[in-house]
């Protein structure tokens, strides 16, 4: 990404020197994503000057790559004619994406400016539920009839290519718009020109419906290595396609969301540096509050066994280690299972396979940790650090507690995400913070149970 | 994914009934990724029967999608001729991927069976460092000379397409194999047949070198919406391309690795259900051991302040809440920053921007949590639950500690990943478990400092 940085700096220098023709030449041929970065650094007045310098298509492509903030600034400076020109260069799915993020007044201006056809399609795209296949598809695909020849198909592509998001997968559709199959551009280019499309098409085509979750679409496209996924309505009619570049965005977006939830943060859809302090605060504080209040239980458990702790204050020294080991053991399992679920590698029906595997892994881990702690307490804490309050029995209580805690933590860690999925919740919420809170309470109860029995407190 | 399940079950039924011609017809047209799933359920004897039923190309494609285990089973059953036939249908990058996972004896057999050209290329691909652009690229791209016409180019594509991994981006190369630019198949299909490739090519082509990290390649391809990324050697000569389907695998792989490290697990490159218990155990136990032993510090801090705890046992009840809130606050920040780093949205040079943002977010969070805890302790713990040991001063000590802990945790959480990146370590290791261990120690020291000063213990 260093190249982008150098490019942006050079462009900014040319702007500050008002060397516009050199700027135009320098910028015009570059990648739209890089050009968009220049706009981030400009005042609206400068931005609109640069925008007018760019070739129409490049300008539109760069516009698509900008953040909503810069898009709004530019739109405010555009004449209606400019606005219409920019949007007429874009694909429908990009327009729908942009419009979704805009304030109502700007949306109205955009929809009033674009052609009636475009307005209709964008309005339709906007009606699909968030994160559905319909909401990320575009309607600009190449549709072919089954009885035309390869030559006809190639001529058709030549005519319409400019307005289509991809020409590399063409869809063969019946008169009633039902999806019959597909032919790739590669197939068309390597088949005899007089072959009939219906004969060379691949009828085995995986499609999704408009209401399918975008995460599922991303999994299917990764699985089948498609460059585009056809989207059909509830009656099986082809209504759009989702291209692989949009799917890569979906994958990143879904990972962002999972990671946020796993670390007890409400997902925010802007990048960190662009998100304002109060938005970040709001995404974090509710979870911290909930988890803080739920620690009341651990407090109650400790209060209940105050007499035991008062009699053997040394027991307190091991509480952090027991709690952390439990939390770490649990989140190792939960994160592994959450990831398996979101990659479609695991389903609720695998719960017994998962439990059986985790029981064995957990037993091994618990045994190792329990033994290691027993030895460590006696050698390091007692002998080396000279803590004379430590006895063989105390070491045994701690080790046994650790053994049980690790075992229980792993079983809870692996089963909660599966149960959450089954009940229709997002498994990602069942990660470290949540598991830790539960495991803390359990490990303390086990600790005091062993302490009171073995040490007779 | 339900469809796949039904498909596999139906195929298995046909196999068990030995209805091979029905099986052949049912299976042959399906997606290779789905066909590969059938093999997972079969004994090697049955697997080789099914494999022989499939059309050659489908068989090879399904083979690529299988797990190493099933691939090894099949190879053992293959004659040399079959082995050679299967591999001759594959792309070089897929062969290199497969060979990498095989035991040495099988690798020797594969390399002895394939053509000398293929052996040479595969050997070259195997020499690139793991996770480098070179290791995931394929050498099967379409190269065009700049002085040929569009018609020549289309005819060339028609001839070579079958052996190329993609024909949708063609690379224009000089005599010395330097990369000059690219033309897309779309451009070729929509340009006059007598246009010259050199005139219509796009010279502004982003490429990577063979040693570039695959994660960076994935970021660049996502940024520029490329279907293929050209890979050049240190002298700028085009040596291969990386296609978008392989990049999607890279994205998943890198996320898997980050997630594993974030939850204190050594990454394993097989799916959970296929990984054996001992491998999972080995990926988890070292981290649990390290974190368990490092909790010795928290134990030492508590031991040192035993007299304070003995005088006011009620202080112990708040230790879990303080530690967990600190850990959660820290990991909220660290996971956000780690993600920003791996998406290339953040760099070390942003550290002051990040710190300034986190100071403000942390202050807000710390203030809210501190006040909420103060009120909660007095209302819930003292009044509602009737814990008479709690005084106004104790509540103040806990709230102040929480305030400082949250503040410190967030600053540590945001800066450690950035520092790790700067020093060349993987930032993902600086997630919850590691941060928690540090924050635990700090929060306890702050706690006892406030306790001894304010409560005069």
Image (cartoon, coloured by chain):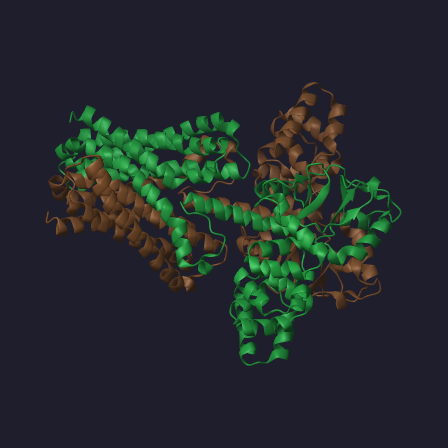
Chain colours: A brown, B green
Res A158 seen here: yes
Q: Is B189 left, or right, of A432 in this rendering?
A: right
When the figure is inspected, residue B37 is found, relative to residue B211, above or below; the finding is below
Quarter location, residue B238: top right
Point out residue B213 in the picture as x, y percentages from the top left corner. Answer: 58, 41
- Residue at 40% over, 58% down: B277
Point out residue B443 in the picture as x, y percentages from the top left corner. Answer: 29, 32
Quarter location, residue A281: top left
Q: Nearer the viewer, residue B216 or B151?
A: B216
Q: Nearer the viewer, residue A289 or B400?
A: B400
Quarter location, residue B375: top left
Q: For the C terminus of chain B, give its image quadrant.
A: top left
Q: Is A298 left, or right, of A262 in this rendering?
A: left
Res A137 seen here: no
- Residue at 25% over, 30% down: B447
- Residue at 17% over, 51% down: A450
- Residue at 62% over, 61% down: B109
When the figure is inspected, residue B351 is found, relative to residue B105, above or below; the finding is above
Point out residue B38 in the picture as x, y percentages from the top left corner. Answer: 55, 69
Point out residue A297 in the picture as x, y percentages from the top left corner. Answer: 24, 45
């Amino acid at each position: 990404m260093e190249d982008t940085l150098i490019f942006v700096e050079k462009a900014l220098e040319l702007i500050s020197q008002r060397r516009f023709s050199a700027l135009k030449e320098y910028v015009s041929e570059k990648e739209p994503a890089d050009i968009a970065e220049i706009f981030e650094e400009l005042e609206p007045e400068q931005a609109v000057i640069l925008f007018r310098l760019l070739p129409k298509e490049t300008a539109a492509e760069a516009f698509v790559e900008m953040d909503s903030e810069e898009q709004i600034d530019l739109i405010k400076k555009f004449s209606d004619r400019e606005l219409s020109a920019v949007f007429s260069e874009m694909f429908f799915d990009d327009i729908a994406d942009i419009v979704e993020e805009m304030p109502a007044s700007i949306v109205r201006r955009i929809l009033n400016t674009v052609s009636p056809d475009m307005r209709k399609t964008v309005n339709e795209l906007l009606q699909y539920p968030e994160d559905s296949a319909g909401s990320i598809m575009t309607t600009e695909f190449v549709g072919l009839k089954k009885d035309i020849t390869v030559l006809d198909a190639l001529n058709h592509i030549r005519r319409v290519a400019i307005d289509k998001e991809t020409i590399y997968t063409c869809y063969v559709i019946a008169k009633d718009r039902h999806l019959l199959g597909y032919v790739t551009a590669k197939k068309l280019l390597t088949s005899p020109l007089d072959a009939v499309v219906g004969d060379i098409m691949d009828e085995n085509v995986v499609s999704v419906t408009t209401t399918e979750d975008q995460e599922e679409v991303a999994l299917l496209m990764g699985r089948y290595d498609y460059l585009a996924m056809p989207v059909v309505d509830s009656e099986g009619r082809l209504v759009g396609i989702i291209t692989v570049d949009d799917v890569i965005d979906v994958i990143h977006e879904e990972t962002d969301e999972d990671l946020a939830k796993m670390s007890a943060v409400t997902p925010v859809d802007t990048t960190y540096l662009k998100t304002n302090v109060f938005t970040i605060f709001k995404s974090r504080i509710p979870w911290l509050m909930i988890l803080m209040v739920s620690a009341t239980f651990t407090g109650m458990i400790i209060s209940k066994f105050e007499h035991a702790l008062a009699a053997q204050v040394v027991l307190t020294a091991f509480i952090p280690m027991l709690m952390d080991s439990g939390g770490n053991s649990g989140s190792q399992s939960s994160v592994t299972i959450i990831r398996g679920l979101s990659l479609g590698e695991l389903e609720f029906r695998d719960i017994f396979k998962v439990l059986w595997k985790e029981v064995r892994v957990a037993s091994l881990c618990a045994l190792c940790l329990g033994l290691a702690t027993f030895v460590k307490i006696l050698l390091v804490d007692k002998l080396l650090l000279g803590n004379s309050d430590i006895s063989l029995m105390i070491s045994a209580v701690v080790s046994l507690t650790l053994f049980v805690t690790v075992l229980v933590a792993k079983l809870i860690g692996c089963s909660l995400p599966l149960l959450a999925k089954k009940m229709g919740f997002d498994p990602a919420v069942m990660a470290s913070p949540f598991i830790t809170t539960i495991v803390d309470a359990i490990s303390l109860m086990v600790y005091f149970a062993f302490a009171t029995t073995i040490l007779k407190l």
